[in-house]
Amino acid sequence: MSYNFSEMIDRRHTNSVKWDVAANELPMWVADMDFRTAPGIVDAIKRKADTGIFGYEEVPEAYFEAVQHWYATEHDWAPNTDWMRFVTGVVPAISSAVRRVSHIGDNVLVQAPVYNIFYNSIVNNGRHVLSSDLQYHEGQYDIDWDDLVAKMADPLTTMMILCNPHNPVGKIWTAAELKRIGELAAANHVVVFADEIHGDITETGYGYTPFAAADEVCANNSITAVSPSKTFNVAALHAATLIIPNENMRNIVDRGINTEELAEPNAFAIDGSIAAYTTGAEWVHELNAQITANKQALTKLIAKKLPQLHVVTGHATYLVWIDCTDVTTDSTALCDFIRKTTGLFITAGSVYGGDGHDFVRINVACPAERLQDGLDRLVAGVTDFQKA
């Protein structure tokens, strides 16, 4: 490898949300990697810092061209730069779109178990969460199409937040699945907001299809959110892009992000993002190879030492979804016990809704040495939990 994904970086006392833990604790919870970001990004930020001037910034065309370049070369989709709008984050953009596209009292459709902050964006804005739960069977998740059809057809359902690829289960939706979702949404006048923040993190040999790239129906009835934040571990840059092919939809969303002051970049957002999208491809490819190896190591160890747990097969994200039903149906109690007795901090699946209470989520985006420490603690914690 050209890049060092084995470096053990001490992130304690750096204002890191992830590492704000006790001295003996190992955090493997929030979606934040322990790898140093791509060198091109660091160099771009250093050059910007050297100017010594950090006044108000605008978003140049070069930013949108960099986004277009990345999606054309990495995902075989070259969205028109006129469709793009800069925003300071995917979650603020989701909340803004909820306010602009739906009305108070409407249903916003999700597919639980799903990223828990979606619920906040819906409920905090006076809308109702309506979930068409994914169906878990023999280690895999699938869409319950009959249920989705019925909930799309509910007159109060006006918006769907699609997680593509899906967090936390790691599923990559096929083009056929996306087309079917798009057809149902268009037929029922349901706008699809596709959160594709994890789209670049796919296992070796796998790729993902952007929702708007599936077909024209999907493109014309959707808002897509992308960002370098998860891919390059630069969440604090606060940079994301909305891609909205439909002009009327774009104008509606555009009014919201400007009214709510979500379109002004910080001093490093533009330079860092352009560097990510124009110089970071090789780094991401090597990152994905490391994450693939880490997932394989976790799966192998669990099969050998914790056969009562079952790893859900998912080919995207650096988050692993693990079935604990042979140990407990209260994953919160399990996670609390593991943290208390071993210091390993992982996420109880109950926060994601649906059948999440039967699962835990583990972040494996870390050096192999740190991963092994986490796995050793997991084995000890689960073993002791069963004895307690």
Image (cartoon, rainbow, N blue to C red):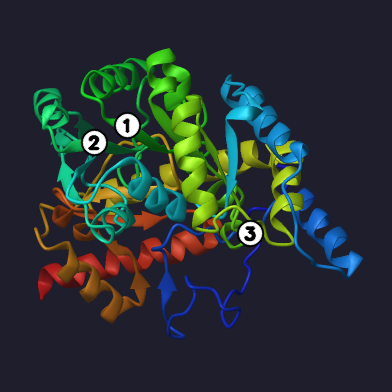
Q: Amino acid at mark 2?
A: Thr
Does 283 sit left or right of 263 as displayed? Answer: right
Residue 387 position by quadrant: bottom left
| Residue 158: assigned label | 2
| Residue 237: assigned label | 3
Q: Position of residue 181 (x, y in %)?
A: 27, 23
Q: Which quadrant is the N terminus positioned in?
A: top right
Is the residue under label 1 in contact with that under label 2 (CB below 8 Å)? Answer: yes
Is residue 65 visible in this depiction of the protein? yes
Is the residue under label 1 in contact with that under label 3 (CB below 8 Å)? Answer: no
Determine whether the residue tagged by mark 3 lies in a helix, strand or loop: helix
Q: CA distance from mark 3 to mark 1?
A: 28 Å
Determine whether the residue tagged by mark 1 lies in a helix, strand or loop: strand
Q: Upstream in the sequence, badge 3 or badge 2?
A: 2
Q: Residue at x 75, y 37 (%)?
A: 61
Q: Residue at x 26, y 24 (%)?
A: 185
Q: Amino acid at mark 3?
A: Leu
Q: Position of residue 323 (x, y in %)?
A: 20, 49
Numbered disc in front, either 3 or 2? 2
Image mark count: 3
Determine whether the residue tagged by mark 2 lies in a helix, strand or loop: strand
Within 10 Å of disc 1 (Cα), the crowding (few <14, some 14-19, many 20+) is many
- Comparing 284 with 161, the one in front is 161
Mark 1 = which residue? 191
Q: Residue at x 38, y 53 (%)?
A: 95
Rendered view: 206 above or below 96:
above
Q: Position of residue 195 (x, y in %)?
A: 42, 41
Residue 68 position by quadrant: top right
Numbered disc in front, either 3 or 1? 1
Q: CA distance from mark 2 to mark 1?
A: 6 Å
Q: Residue at x 72, y 32 (%)?
A: 65
Q: CA distance from mark 3 to mark 2?
A: 32 Å
